[in-house]
Amino acid sequence: MERRKALGLIAATGAAAASLTAAPAFGAETARAGATAQHRGKGGYTFALDKTVKRTSVRFTNRFGIQVAGDLYVRKGARGKLPALVVSGPFGAVKEQSSGLYAHELARRGYVTLAFDPSFTGESGGKVRDVASPDVYTEDFSAAVDFLGLQKGVDRERIGVQAVCGLSGMALTAAAADSRIKAVVTASMYDMSRGISRGYQDSYTREQRQKVVDYLSRQRWADAEKGTYARGSHEVPFDADNNVAPSNLVLPRTLPADADPITTIFFDYYRTERGYHPRSINSTTAWTSTTPASFFAFRQLTDLDLLAPRKALLVAGADAHSLYYSEDVRATAPDAIDLLIVPGADHVDLYDRKDLIPFDQIDAFFTEHLA
């Protein structure tokens, strides 16, 4: 089933969410057959901390004055000035999930790594909770570079970025505007501005795009009148009558028997023991309903020609529904951007499947381009 139909399914299930079974209690076993159980770490992490790696909770401030929460990973006993990586996770995830796993695994390979919660989410600051902006999120990457470059154990001339899924577009955008970022790797990349404002595979018609803009505009009046911020779909679906049909959940609380493959793979990560976290928007709730407005207003990836002579590597699953984003981005700057396709991997496999994530190739890329 196509993603636009999947979104319609989520909209249909979201309205009835209150009557459905609640999401699994944190740390509880899921009863869903086929869910992938992972060895969880202490403190709500979806992975265990290796005895060779030290993790430290840190805070830093971006140029908008928002305090960003992060975890700093470093291999115990490390000496000298080390290369460093800013690590972000998927859109709506937190540092205890996929970004933390990447940061942990790359720290084992000798990097100082910083996984962070984007502004307004997780443990980061921002008065309005669970709102997203491509501008602010792009700034979070540069603020993380500020922080890393001030650490005595970091070589500030060897700082890169590892981004996963929906924050990847912001990572590449940040790198194009911040030459301190010497190399970028993405996994399962999404261009959230394109996806939110145009639909999956640019499926929105001109009429549908206008309907979404009208819905967001009316919602601003509703929020202003109530003095609160309603929740709603960041990718706005349509019903059978071609009317906007937003949901108050990113994912249904229970997976319908006829769920499409895309909804299923996200559910099997965020809504099961495999990847569930109580601070993750995707695991528990939805974004503020007017969040899409910023992604209609601000484009990403517009200045990728400024990456050169620096390099980026886009890693994508051969079976990923999102592969086209990486293919299209690579085509815009083939001299600066390489594409690595992982056989047998779907989009979510690259969140946490260590048997499929090509860490050796990622390490080799950073070793070469952060030299």
Image: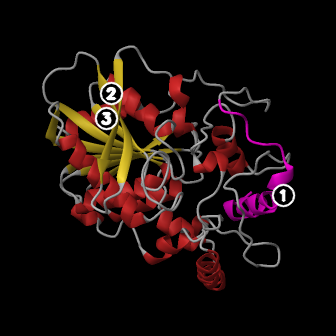
Q: Residue 107: which numbered mark, if any?
A: 2
The residue at which mark 3 appears reads as 113
* Contact check, label 2 and label 3, Cβ < 8 Å: yes
Q: Which amino acid does label 2 sit on?
A: Ala
Q: Which amino acid does label 1 sit on?
A: Ala
Q: Quadrant of the N terminus?
A: bottom right
In primary-sequence order, the first of circles 3 and 1 is 1
At 46% from the left and 40% from the top, the residue drawn is 95
Question: Which residues are the magenta region?
Answer: 1-26
Query: Cα distance, mark 2 to mark 3?
Result: 6 Å
At 63% from the left and 80% from the top, the residue drawn is 225
At 43% from the left and 58% from the top, the residue drawn is 126
Please tell me whether mark 1 or mark 2 is closer to you in this view. Answer: 1
Question: Label 2's element?
Answer: helix
The residue at which mark 1 appears reads as 16
In primary-sequence order, the first of circles 1 and 2 is 1
On the image, the x and y values in percent for residue 2 come to 70, 60
Residue 145 is covered by the magenta coloring: no
Q: What residue type is labelled 3?
A: Thr
Query: Cα distance, mark 3 to mark 1?
Result: 41 Å
Residue 17 is covered by the magenta coloring: yes
Query: Cα distance, mark 1 to mark 2?
Result: 43 Å
